Image (cartoon, rainbow, N blue to C red):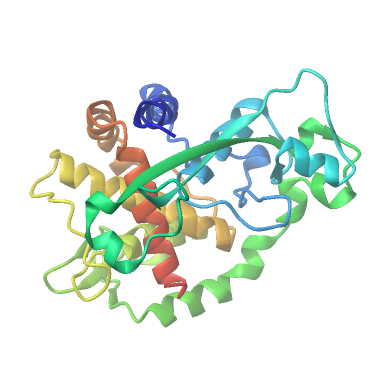
Amino acid sequence: MNSSKNIDHYTEVTNQIIIALENNTKPWIKPWCGGVLTPQKRYNGDSYQGVNTLILWGEASKKQHNSSFWMTFKQAKLLGGNVKKGEKSTSVFYSGVIKNKKDEEKPTKQDLTEKENYRKFMKSYSVFNASQIDNLSDEYYIKPEEENQNKELKKLPELEAFIAKTKAKIKHDAGNAYYREKEDYIQMPKMQLFKSVNAYYATLCHELTHWTKHKTRLDRDLGGKRFGDNGYAMEELVAELGAAFLSVGFGIVPDVRDDHVPYIANWLEVLKSDKKAIFTAASLAQKAANYLLGKE
């Protein structure tokens, strides 16, 4: 796929996010049916990651899809399903690197250090939500609210175990939530100061994502020096998305934090100036979530 088509993909997805933010809606905060946050899954149950998660959350919300499963036309047919007449597909993306050769064989480590020997690519393919398809087995039509019934109550002990496993230093002796990189600790208000248990854990997931940027962990430096600059805004966007990705696995329904409203204007500025920014932020956020979950 040539670079101009890649740019079109970046622009298409970024514009969707920009429209939502201009309407004061964070598409990763409440982009699910019935108020339940769920992973968006392939036909085989594997979860989508990174920017594809954002895309599918947005489509599920906009079109009121009530299933978490997505599949191609061919996959639906192999499962005995039929895409309903008139239904429109959604584009999701994958990327990689290939050699600058006709056979496009997988590049070696040496090739990757010599940039002239390889090129990056991004391709798209079309998927349909299970609610757009007839005659699938019942498992594909489970509604998110049925799948996650009482999940919050069951997941609290798992959340505590997850937090302990990170070995992050967390203090509960002030009224604000933040990560102090120099001293390498997270500051959280006490749980009873939050309006819900969900709000507490969602906020902690946000700060844990910031915690991963330390040089001894993922060494993520986006160049932010002060509130409002692009690097600062990008790091906050990474933390927002990281918290959302973590919330998926633990059944947390995050609230809109009043103290994050000012960030929307900063994010809009970044997204309008760089059409790849949301892809970069989503990729870094997924990497942070995977690190915290022990997948890296």
Q: Farthest residue toward the front? A: 102
Q: Farthest residue toward the left? A: 225
Q: Specify whether residue 195 is in view.
A: no
Residues 73 and 266: in front is 73
Image quadrant holding the C terminus, namely bottom left
Q: Residue at x 23, y 62 (%)?
A: 113
x, y (%) of residue 181?
Answer: 16, 67
Q: Farthest residue toward the top? A: 86
Q: Residue at x 34, y 61 (%)?
A: 209
Left or right, 103 with reference to 185: right
Q: Is residue 283 above or below residue 263?
A: below
User: Which image quadrant is residue 286 in?
Assistant: bottom left
Q: Residue at x 46, y 51 (%)?
A: 244
Q: Specify whether residue 270 is in view.
A: yes
Q: How many marks?
A: 0
Q: Residue at x 59, y 58 (%)?
A: 251
User: Which image quadrant is residue 172 in?
Assistant: bottom left
Image quadrant holding the N terminus, namely top left
Q: Is residue 229 above or below residue 113?
A: above
Residues 108 and 182: in front is 108
x, y (%) of residue 196?
Answer: 50, 55
Residues 244 and 88: in front is 88
x, y (%) of residue 44?
Answer: 73, 56
Left or right, 162 with reference to 47: left
